[in-house]
């Protein structure tokens, strides 16, 4: 797939912002705010003027003192007044400068995070299977923050350094052009320092960023595993794993700090040696009158030379920060430029779904695996039919459900929905007609009402209550302190497993789906809870095409057809009675559970 076609499918913001080069992405991010940034730079020139005007005033005052009365005191009062104006203007200009810069930078920050979130919504489910949420969070939070810092540093240091450089060169060119030789010689020196340190700085930044992501992944896994860790008293092992990761993180940080400090020291010593040399030469030239220099001019020359070397050093010091910032731009580019997105744009939208499925010689293999997880699967499912998939662990049942939802695409063969190839339709329009009730019910930190009406607008009170009633959930919801408005805590932690599943059933019911996916919906519950859920599910399944995966055969007994899968292939199809009479694989599974 070409980059162009992917960019075309993305939203205009993402499509315009992504670029092959990180600088292109940065440029696009500030597209709307270049005016603010330019104005901020102009204001900066005024704000920063004391730095290069003060040496002029100081030199003038020294020359007034050493002129032995030739220059009148009026000039001293004038210098004092100038100093006052030059310093006071810094208060309003500093405020305006920071305000303009902040407006542009904060807007870029929000825009970039929103673009990343938008792109994450488009990524395929396969993308998420390969990445930890911790890594993605690190990109959206840490990397965007580093890009923000990069801009701040560049816009604070760059105009200052450039301005100082120009002011120093112009003043020295007028006062004592000979000294320009010194000034020009600092450029190759800066180039040598930058060149020798560029590669180590780049590679240690990249290594450090990868360590940050790996640490974020480890931390998010550790936090998710805490209930299991505690139940198995495995805290020590978990801490050992984290400590190992922390040692790697620390080593990468130490390497980065070492490279940065070597670079800083090398540039500081080189430029200060140059400063000293300039002072000695200026003093010698004045002492011997080799050049017509007054004492004030020696002070001026050396002040300007240190301003100049300071500016060159500032520019050189920006290099590691730019490298770090560009590494983060590259990191977010890994999401923005990722081609593994779900491809819906321009495809046929479905307004109605009857729920007829035809699996035609469907094969599926996961990326980077040799073995097929599903092999030459052919099956026809009628609207309203309930199909149960049973089979040993790893036989391919969940893979099949993921193909039905459109999370995965067959590697060969076709799945037709009401005669349309699933690969050619806009999956978002199809999924409006699906509900999924899975073993792990996903609830979020909000009210019961918010969780049930997720993705729907303007649902009436009566509809919500009916859905809860049909899901056998109304009674316990009304018993909660705020009824439908009770906040159920992150991931529904304040509810029992059975209650969570009944809310998930209510959520499915309210959507009135044509296609229902039930994945192990009744496992791990006591018999009363299971009975309530089974009853709710039967109501839910009525008149809808339903795909059920369950290890407990009791829950699939009532299915219209049971499909037995082994090693990714269909080996038996029939209803419960006929399969038991066949004395095949299903009958054996049945006997094992009896
Ligand atoms: N993300 C993945 N990457 C590679 N292989 C996978 C992936 N997910 C599943 N598999 C493999 O595909 C095969 C089918 O897995 P699947 O999860 O569909 O089985 P299942 O019948 O649902 O198993 P269970 O009943 O244990 O949930 C297995 O061999 C499994 O190892």
Image (cartoon, rainbow, N blue to C red):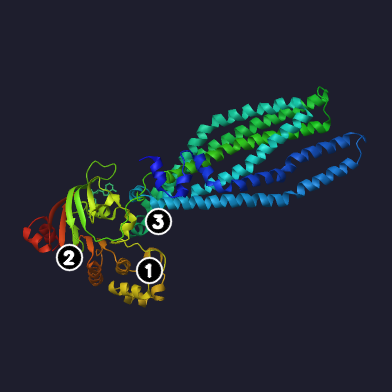
Please give the residue where the numbered disc 1 appears in the rendered image: 494
Please give the residue where the numbered disc 3 appears in the rendered image: 223
Which mark's residue is nearer the viewer, 2 or 1?
2
Q: Could you say where residue 117 lies in the image, as x and y percent from the top left?
A: 44, 53
Q: Quadrant of residue 546?
A: bottom left
Q: In this view, does 210 lie above or below 134?
A: above
Helix, strand or loop at mark 1: loop
Labelled disc at residue 554:
2
Left or right: 439, with 64 as reference point: left
Tell me which label, 3 or 2, sits earlier in the chain. 3
Q: Could you say where residue 29 lies in the image, as x and y percent from the top left?
A: 52, 46
Q: How crowded is mark 2: few (under 14 residues within 10 Å), some or many (20 or more)?
A: few
Q: Could you say where residue 185 lies in the image, as x and y percent from the top left?
A: 67, 26
Can residue 81 be seen in this snapshot? yes
Can residue 244 be seen in this snapshot? no
Tell me which label, 1 or 3, sits earlier in the chain. 3
In space, the residues marked 2 and 1 are separated at their CA atoms by: 29 Å
Identify which residue, 201 or 362, lies in the foreground.
362
Q: Quadrant of residue 508?
A: bottom left
Helix, strand or loop at mark 3: helix
Which mark's residue is nearer the viewer, 1 or 3?
1
């Amino acid at each position: 797939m070409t980059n162009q076609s992917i960019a075309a499918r993305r939203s205009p913001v993402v499509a315009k912002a992504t670029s092959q080069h990180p600088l292109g992405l940065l440029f696009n991010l500030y597209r709307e705010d270049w005016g603010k940034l330019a104005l901020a730079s102009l204001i900066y020139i005024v704000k920063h003027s004391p730095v290069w005007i003060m040496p002029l005033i100081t030199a003038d005052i020294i020359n007034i003192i050493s002129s032995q009365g030739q220059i009148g005191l009026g000039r001293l009062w004038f210098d004092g007044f100038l100093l006052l104006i030059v310093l006071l203007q810094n208060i309003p200009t500093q405020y305006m400068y920071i305000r303009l810069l902040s407006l542009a930078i904060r807007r870029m920050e929000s825009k970039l995070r929103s673009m990343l979130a938008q792109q994450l919504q488009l990524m395929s489910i396969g993308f998420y299977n390969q990445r930890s949420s911790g890594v993605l969070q690190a990109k959206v939070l840490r990397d965007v923050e580093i890009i923000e810092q990069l801009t701040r540093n560049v816009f604070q240091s760059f105009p200052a350094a450039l301005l100082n450089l120009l002011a120093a060169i112009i003043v020295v060119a007028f006062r004592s052009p000979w000294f320009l030789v010194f000034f020009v010689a600092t450029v190759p020196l800066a180039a040598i320092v930058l060149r020798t340190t560029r590669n180590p700085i780049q590679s240690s930044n990249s290594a450090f960023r990868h360590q940050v992501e790996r640490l974020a992944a480890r931390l998010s896994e550790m936090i998710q595993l805490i209930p299991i860790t505690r139940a198995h008293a495995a805290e020590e092992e978990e801490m050992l794993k984290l400590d190992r990761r922390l040692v790697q993180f620390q080593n990468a940080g130490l390497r980065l700090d070492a490279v940065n400090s070597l670079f800083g020291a090398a540039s500081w010593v080189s430029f200060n040696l140059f400063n000293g040399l300039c002072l000695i030469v200026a003093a010698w030239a004045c002492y011997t009158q080799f050049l017509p220099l007054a004492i004030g001019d020696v002070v001026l020359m050396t002040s300007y030379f240190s301003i100049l070397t300071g500016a060159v050093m500032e520019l050189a010091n920006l290099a590691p920060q730019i490298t770090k910032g560009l590494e983060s731009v590259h990191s977010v580019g890994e999401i923005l430029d990722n081609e593994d997105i779900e491809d819906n744009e321009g495809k046929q939208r479905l307004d109605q779904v009857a729920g007829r499925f035809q699996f035609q010689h469907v094969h599926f293999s996961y990326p980077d695996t040799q073995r097929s997880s599903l092999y030459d699967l052919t099956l026809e499912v009628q609207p309203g039919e309930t199909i149960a998939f049973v089979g040993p662990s790893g036989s391919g049942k969940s893979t099949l459900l993921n193909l039905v939802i459109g999370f995965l695409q067959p590697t060969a063969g076709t799945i037709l929905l009401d005669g349309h190839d699933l690969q050619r339709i806009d999956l978002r329009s199809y999924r409006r007609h699906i509900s999924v009730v899975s073993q792990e019910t996903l609830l979020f930190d909000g009210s019961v009402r918010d969780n049930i009406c997720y993705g729907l607008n303007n649902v009436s009170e009566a509809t919500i209550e009916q859905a809860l009633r049909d899901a056998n959930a109304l009674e316990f919801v009304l018993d909660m302190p705020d009824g439908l408005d009770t906040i159920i805590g992150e991931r529904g932690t304040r509810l029992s497993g059975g209650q969570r599943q009944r809310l998930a059933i209510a959520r499915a019911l309210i959507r009135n789906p044509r296609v229902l996916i039930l994945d192990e919906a009744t496992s791990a519950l006591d018999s009363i809870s299971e009975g309530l859920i089974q009853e709710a599910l039967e109501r839910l399944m009525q008149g809808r095409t339903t795909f059920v995966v369950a290890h407990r055969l009791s829950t699939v007994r009532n299915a219209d057809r049971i499909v037995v899968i082994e090693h990714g292939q269909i080996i038996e199809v029939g209803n419960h009675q006929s399969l038991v009479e066949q004395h095949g694989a299903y009958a054996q599974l049945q006997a094992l559970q009896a």
